[in-house]
Amino acid sequence: MTSTRRLVFCVLLAFLAAIGGVFVGRALLPQPKQPGAALHEVLHHKLALDADQQARLKVLEDRFAVQRRTLELELRAANAHLAQAIEAEHGNGPRVAAAVDQSHTAMGELQKATLAHMFAMRQLLRADQTSQFDDAVVKALTDSQG
């Protein structure tokens, strides 16, 4: 076997080993849960929503998806502004402080919108459904994974 073939073989073998390691790691290690996944599970699969509740929930979720995307873009822009300020000042100067405030404002707006959406979803529920929803909200907010 020539040195070129040996090198190609070693590179290919290393690549296959890396791919195999990824698959084994994904199979053996638990995947982190997405924030809100448990709440979504309760809302869509455990509360037995009637057709009217499902239709109204879809409207709320579609509207919030647009609002959330807009707020996430604002947060991303605020973080980019913060990065620029840090790069320019190389310290905690006035531009950095202003950019931090802008970032905190964007985060706060996203959190307020998320809470408003959650309370709007809760309003769709019957009295016999709210306690399970409330438990899922508390768990989502206090779970160390999410």
Image (cartoon, helix red, strand yellow):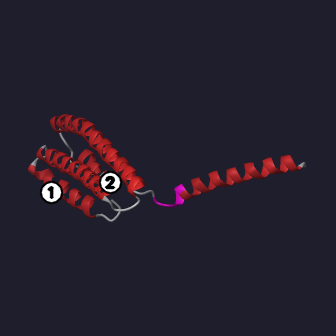
Indicate yes or no whether the magenta region holds residue 39.
no
- Mark 1 belongs to which amino acid? Ser
Relative depth, front residue between 32 and 55: 32
Q: Position of residue 52 (x, y in %)?
A: 15, 35
Q: Secondary structure at mark 2?
A: loop
Quadrant of res 77:
top left
**For residue 3, side relative to residue 93 (left or right):** right
Q: Which numbered disc covers residue 69?
A: none
Residue at 29 percent of width and 49 percent of height: 41
Q: Is residue 25 left or right of residue 71?
A: right
Q: Determine if the magenta segment contains residue 28.
A: yes
Nearer the observer, 79 or 21: 79
The stretch of residues the image draws in magenta is 26-30
The mark lying in front, picked from 1 and 2, is 2
The secondary element bearing badge 1 is classed as: helix
Q: Quadrant of the C terminus?
A: bottom left
Vertical arrangement, residue 127 with respect to residue 63, above or below: below
Residue sitting at the far right: 1
Q: Give the alpha-carbon distance from disc 1 to disc 2, as whole Å.
A: 20 Å
Read off the residue under disc 2.
35
Q: Main secondary structure of the magenta part?
A: helix
Which amino acid, by three-letter code, is at mark 2? Pro
> Residue 2: where, in percent of width, then height?
90, 48
In the foreground, 78 or 124? 78
For the residue carrying disc 1, how many other residues have a C-alpha within 10 Å: few (<14), some (14-19), or many (20+)? few
- Residue underneath mark 1: 131
Q: Earlier in the sequence, mark 1 or mark 2?
A: 2
Q: Position of residue 87 (x, y in %)?
A: 42, 54
